[in-house]
Image (cartoon, helix red, strand yellow):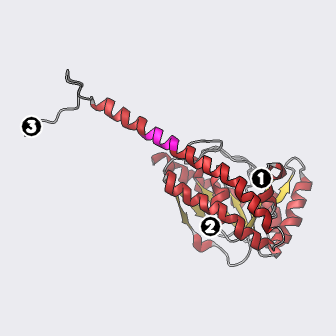
Amino acid sequence: MAEKLPLRLSPKGQLRAPHFRHLCMRLHSLSQALRSLLFNAVMFSSVTIYALLSLLTWPFASLVRYRFISQWARFHIWLLAALCGLRYRVEGREHLPDRTAVVLSKHQSSWETLAFQQIFPPQVWVLKRELLFVPFFGWGLALLDPIAIDRGAGRRAVQQITEQGRQRLETGRWVVVFPEGTRMAAGHHRRFGIGGAALAAATGHPVVPVAHNAGHYWPRRGFLKKPGIIRVVIGPVIESRGKTAEEINRLAETWIGETMTRLEAGSDDS
């Protein structure tokens, strides 16, 4: 059998194997950049149109507004899969309680703010109030009744989360909290704030801890969306009755931290 030789550049212009691989990598990177550019163009242009349409839902009940506005997020999760090859898989759905709950989640990307609207029941988020002042986007966001806080307000912010969060839970909506307070780069961690745990302790609602590795595929402040499968892991419910806010926070932070270690190790191998 003739020995197979690597591609070399001959006088007739044959392509070396390393050059061919480099060309394929360049073409792949270009394709990824173009797909990401198109996704961003659709997302940023559609938010203006959809925000204006969302204003028409103002007279309706909050859950009606939510169902309409959340379709924008659902569309972009579909577009990510169709255009950028970025999908997700949820593990631990069996842990979801059949009553309203407080979600304490890792925050790495813009992705989870979209996908959680598809994964969890109708919800509101704790967020920085400055987002409500963003033209168009902030208008639609305000219609979803978020708990918009001044992150520098300390105890007043925690009290606001508790009071407004209680009202949202009583009207059948889950409350999503990113206890790190901001998006963290993959592999990084920030001490958990107490607000979400304080809400759970004050109301007796269960806590659902969530870990994911979205930051590996759609980094914070990142332009490129990498193809792959984001893993979302929903942990066992943390019952809040009989526990202090500090105990709840410690349990959630420990579980999320340990799960993130496993997820990010898997992402490094992908």
Please give the residue where the numbered disc 1 appears in the rendered image.
136
Q: Residue sitting at 81 percent across and 73 percent down? A: 60
Give the percent coordinates (x, y) of residue 92.
57, 68
Q: Is residue 189 magenta?
A: no
Q: Which mark is residue 2?
A: 3
Mark closer to the chain start, 3 or 1? 3
Q: Amino acid at mark 3?
A: Ala
| Residue 153, above or below 12 | below
Q: Residue sitting at 55 percent across and 55 percent down? A: 80
| Residue 90, above or below 154 | below
Q: Amino acid at mark 2?
A: Ile
Query: Magenta stretch mostly in which secondary structure?
Result: helix
Give the percent coordinates (x, y) of residue 133.
83, 49
* Real-space Cα separation, disc 3 to disc 1, in angstroms: 66 Å
Q: Which mark is residue 119?
A: 2
Residue situated in front as seen by the camera: 92 or 132:
132
Mark closer to the chain start, 1 or 2? 2
Question: Image check: 29 left or right of 13?
Answer: right
Magenta-highlighted residues: 28-34
Mark 3 neighbour density, 10 Å: few (under 14) some (14–19) many (20 or more): few
Q: Residue sitting at 46 percent across and 42 percent down? A: 31
